[in-house]
Image (spheres, rainbow, N blue to C red):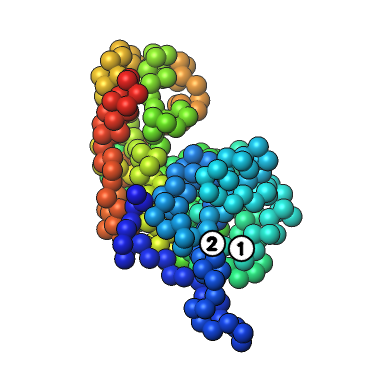
Amino acid sequence: MGILSGSEYDPEPLILPSNQTPLGALPARFRRQRILIVGCGDVGLRTAGQLGAPQSQRLRLLALTSSPERLRLLRACGITPLLGDLDDAASLKRLAGIAHRVIHLAPPPNASERDPRSLALVRALRLRSMPQALVYGSTTGVYGDCGGQRINETRAVHPHTPRAQRRVDAEALMRWLGRSGVRVSVLRIPGIYAADREGGTPRARLLKGTPVLVAKEDVYTNHIHANDLARACVAALWRGKPQRVVNVSDDTDLKMGDYFDLAADLYGLPKPPRISRSDADTALPLMLLSFMQESRRLDNSRMKQELRLVLHYPHVRDGLSLQTALFGF
């Protein structure tokens, strides 16, 4: 069952009156809301599953893909695939006016401090009647290092990496689109985990024995289960307030080393070694070090109050424990 049921999950039907067709007399297939997923990877497919099950007769799901190899998979999931490439603006013209609601989960390219993909999407959507609502999946990295403080969405962005700066650029593009009448929700997302997600658990890192920081130098980290994130995307699509930023995070309050210690206990694996930050600078790769240089604790009150999302996995212990029960590790 999806996130919402009954009268709560009630997307308004599309009604197109004309001189020949009175209101409400159109066939159901013309009244279905069309929802476009851009960046339909793991989270996109989970979101489609949440959308498709309870209201399959009320919604039509579409997904943009640049890979012909994914056409069969998308169709098998009940999604109509649209071939197009965010790096090729000309291929996006067909998106104009095609959807009533959009979920944008595509990441920026790994270059510069801008997001040309989001720019190309926004330009395509503006060519014709624009969607009623758009949900954008951003990152909590836009906050930068907060020194372990608990922060909410009023915290000013202060990106420390080009990766986070690209997301700030994309968020600005979404807000610009919102000024044209689209109800935009920006979801700021921390680390995503799930047992059935590629690289979605700490098990591989524990098996490698990758060190973590000593407790006094460690940083707070934040998480969300992939299924709860998908449910948040659906909630924002229907319930999100206009031009609103929402932290999508669970209730876990752990430092990174404690998170890996917890996972090690659940998996029956050795806990990772602890090293000082100075040793980490020479022992660990730059990408991993970048996550160890920012510490923050996310306030998820807005997600619970405005999106009315009840987490299925409020603590990483819940998600990781289920994983050990289902997969035997």
The residue to which callout 2 is attached is 34
Amino acid type of disc 1?
Ile
- How many C-alpha atoms fall within 10 Å of the one at disc 1: few (<14), some, or many (≥20)? some
Residue 75 versus residue 247: which sits nearer the camera?
75
Identify the residue at horizontal 29%, vertical 30% (top origin).
322
Name the N-terminal-most of marks 2 and 1. 2
Determine whether 92 is above or below 159 in the image. Answer: below
Identify the residue at horizontal 34%, vertical 49% (top origin).
1
The answer to whether 209 appears left or right of 72 in the picture is: left
Camera sees residue 101 = no
| Labels 2 and 1 touching (C-beta < 8 A) | yes
Residue 83 versus residue 283: which sits nearer the camera?
83
- Residue 119: which quarter of the image? bottom right
Q: Whole-percent x and y of residue 166?
A: 55, 46
Identify the residue at horizontal 44%, vertical 47% (top origin).
49
Q: CA distance from mark 2 to mark 1?
A: 7 Å
Tag 2, which secondary structure? strand
Amino acid type of disc 2?
Arg
Camera sees residue 329 = yes
Q: Whole-percent x and y of residue 304?
A: 28, 54
Residue 94 versus residue 142: which sits nearer the camera?
94
Q: Residue furthest bottom?
A: 19
The residue to which callout 1 is attached is 98
The answer to whether 98 appears left or right of 149 in the picture is: right
Determine whether 90 is above or below 87 in the image. Answer: below
- How many C-alpha atoms fall within 10 Å of the one at disc 2: few (<14), some, or many (≥20)? many
Identify the residue at horizontal 47%, vertical 29% (top origin).
198
User: Residue 64 shows which numbered tag?
Assistant: none
